[in-house]
Amino acid sequence: MVKNPEVKGPQFEHDCDSCLFLGRGVYDRDEKKISVDMYVCPGTSCTFIARCSSDGPDYFSRDVSWITKSFVTKDASHSEIWELAIKRCKERAPEVYEKVELFIEHHTLLKLMEKKEQRIQNKMKNLVAAIKEETDEAKKAVLDTALGNLLDADTTLFSAKCFIENDLSPF
């Protein structure tokens, strides 16, 4: 669980002048509470950083694409410290948060497309089974046409998904 202690400045030294301080947080890591300073580096990859001490390599970080994807897909890597960092980014660095929003929209759209793709593929499987069982040739032809239409829709959706993943990436 992440706590949100309001503190004015960072508790640890950080060596990147480009980073924006987002505040402090407490991160539960392996049943151990770690006090961290949260930053966002608004460069090309828009990286979120949780600094654990003033020692240079004592931090962990994630790029915005990884963080937003873990939120949208609700996978196991989702972490409250990154959720707090994004919330603080929205409050304290709105110009950077615009990039974050693009990634959230990007991953949400891809997730919706994947769900639609699964539904189409399930319908295709059901149609294939129905075609195999159908004895009436006229009904078989109608089912076969429906299957062809679903195959076209699946191909179009797959192409659109590839385009969004590769060509419309926010960065």
Image (cartoon, grey):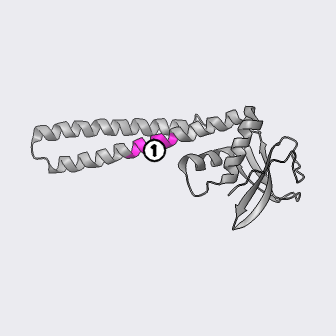
Quadrant in the picture for residue 8 = top right
Look at 46% across and 40% down and name the residue there: 113
Quadrant in the picture for residue 107 = top right
Quick check: is 117 in the magenta stretch? yes
Look at 59% across and 48% down and name the residue there: 71
**SS at circle 1:** helix
Q: Position of residue 168 (x, y in %)?
A: 58, 34
Quick check: is 91 in the magenta stretch? no
Look at 74% across and 47% down and name the residue there: 48
Point out the residue furthest to the left here. 136
Dominant SS of magenta comes to helix
Look at 35% across and 42% down and name the residue there: 120
The kind of residue on which mark 1 rests is Glu
Left or right: 74, with 61 as reference point:
left
Quadrant including the C terminus: top right
Vertical side of 133 occupied by 170: above or below: above
Q: Position of residue 67 (x, y in %)?
A: 64, 48
- Residue at numbered disc 1: 114
Which of the pair 152/77 is nearer the observer?
Answer: 77
Give, as a single range, the part of the protein colored magenta.
110-118
Q: Is residue 58 visible?
A: yes
Quadrant including the N terminus: bottom right
Left or right: 130, with 10 as reference point:
left
